[in-house]
Structures are given as structure tokens and as C-alpha cells.
Image (cartoon, rainbow, N blue to C red):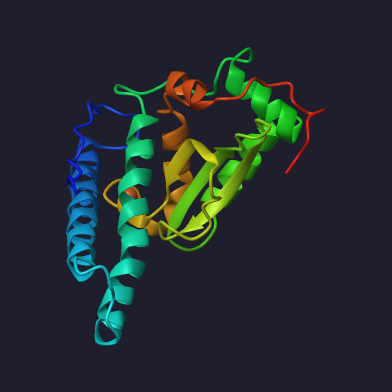
Amino acid sequence: MENYKARQFDLSNLKGISDETLEMHFKLYEGYVKETNNLSTRIGEFIQDAKVDQEEMPAYSELTRRLGFEYNGMVLHEYYFDNLQKGGGTGDPAKTSQFVKAAESAFGSYDIWKADFVGIGKMRGVGWAICYENPANGRLSNHWITLHETGNVAGFTPILVMDVWEHAYLLDYKPAERPKYIEAFFSNIDWNTVNKRLKVETGLSNKATV
Ligand SMILES: [Fe+2]
């Protein structure tokens, strides 16, 4: 099985999120890539003989449970870094953009979508705020993800991914200042990338909903 390679991100000079934070965050991300590879290899060794013996089951189970944590930790960080823009973004998206149309279709307005997304970002606990698109009908919905793996919706496409673990902002803000970090996050969003992630044409309110 081929190992994943940690990606390099051309990201610096963000507004309100320091390069020191980014450097530390890239290193953390590399740790998830390494552990995903490590766990995949070790699980692979258990199943080399095409069976899992009873005495192997506890260790095999633990490694497999941890794989969900590490794998999602790797993938979500890639989405997160990709939806930030080097040098900072331009704030809210263009009113005519596909994302705004999709947000209006699902939430009534961009502002209501944003209030929901920001509200989720302020929830207590460590995890992620993620806006997903349902590929069946293009409908956007916002979700709270605990840790990295609990709350992701199977098959949905991550459109906007915001890390709200404290490591994402602790060098720049106090733990209680998460709202300031969220504001900084919004000023750095690469809306072009976000728009490109949308797969389904918008204006879909008449289509079947799931
Ligand atoms: Fe993170």
C-alpha cells in the first residue's frame, strides 16, 4: 500500500493568523499524515494472513478505531489550508457567486448561513465547523464535527472547513477569544476554492431533499 505524502501549502501573511501558528499547524498536520500511514501499515500486518485471530482482535480494534481519527485529521486539515488564501482574502463572497446562491437556496440568505456557521464554530469543545454540500441535490448544511471523525456526513462534500481546535489560534488569541479567530478566519477565506468545490448547480429548492 502506498503511503500518503504530506502536502506543502503555500500559505502565509494571513490577516490575524500568524505565520508561527501556520508553521505549527503544518507540523501538526504532518503528524496526522504520518500516523495515518503508520496505522494503515500496522493494520495491514494483522491481515496479511487473511484473517484476524481472536487474540489479535483487541489491538486490531484499537488501531482501526484510531485510524478514523488520524485519517479525518489528515484530510480535514488539507481542506482547511486549501480554503485559506495567502496574503488574506477579501471578506465575504461576491453576491453573485455560486456559494452565495447555494447558501440562499438552503438558508434563505448568506447572512443566515453565516450566523449558523459562526455559531457552530463557537460551540464548546474541540472540533470543526464544516459546511457540506449534499451531492444528491446541492443543498448546503453546516455541521459540528467533534475531534475529527464524529459528525461527518457520509458522502457529503466539504465546501468550507474551519478548524476550531485551540491549536488553530492559541498563539494569536486567548482560549476565550475564539470569536476573534473566527472573524480572522473569515477574512482569509479563498472563495474561489470554495466555489470550485460546489459540484451541483444551485437553484435546487424544487428538487428532492434528503
Ligand atoms: Fe488543526
Q: Residue furthest bottom?
A: 55
Residue 184 sits above or below residue 64 on the image: above
What is the quadrant of residue 47 in the picture?
bottom left
Residue 17: % across, % down: 31, 37
Q: Residue at x 23, y 65 (%)?
A: 43
Q: How far across and down, in percent of the image, does residue 177 sit?
A: 43, 51
Apparent side of residue 142 relative to residue 197 in the rendered image (left or right): right
Q: Is residue 121 left or right of residue 167?
A: right
List x then y, in percent, for residue 110: 66, 28
The residue nearer to you, when weighing 165 against 80, is 80
Residue, far right:
206
Q: Residue at point 24% right, 40% down?
A: 22
Q: Is residue 179 visible?
A: yes
Give the answer, above or below, for where 173 lies relative to 136.
below
Q: Residue placed farthest to the top in the image?
A: 96
Vertical relation: 194 (above or below) 44: above
Q: Looking at the image, which is closer to me, 153 or 15?
A: 153
* Camera sees residue 169: no
Tell me the quarter of the image containing the C terminus: top right
In the image, 6 versus 163, the foreground residue is: 6
Q: Residue visible at 54% across and 57% down? A: 123
| Residue 177 higher or lower than 204, as above or below | below
Q: Residue furthest front?
A: 50
Locate residue 189, reporting x and y percent. Answer: 43, 28
Residue at 60 percent of width and 44 percent of height: 142
Give the number of callouts. Answer: 0
Q: In the rendered view, does 132 fall on the left or right side of 60?
A: right
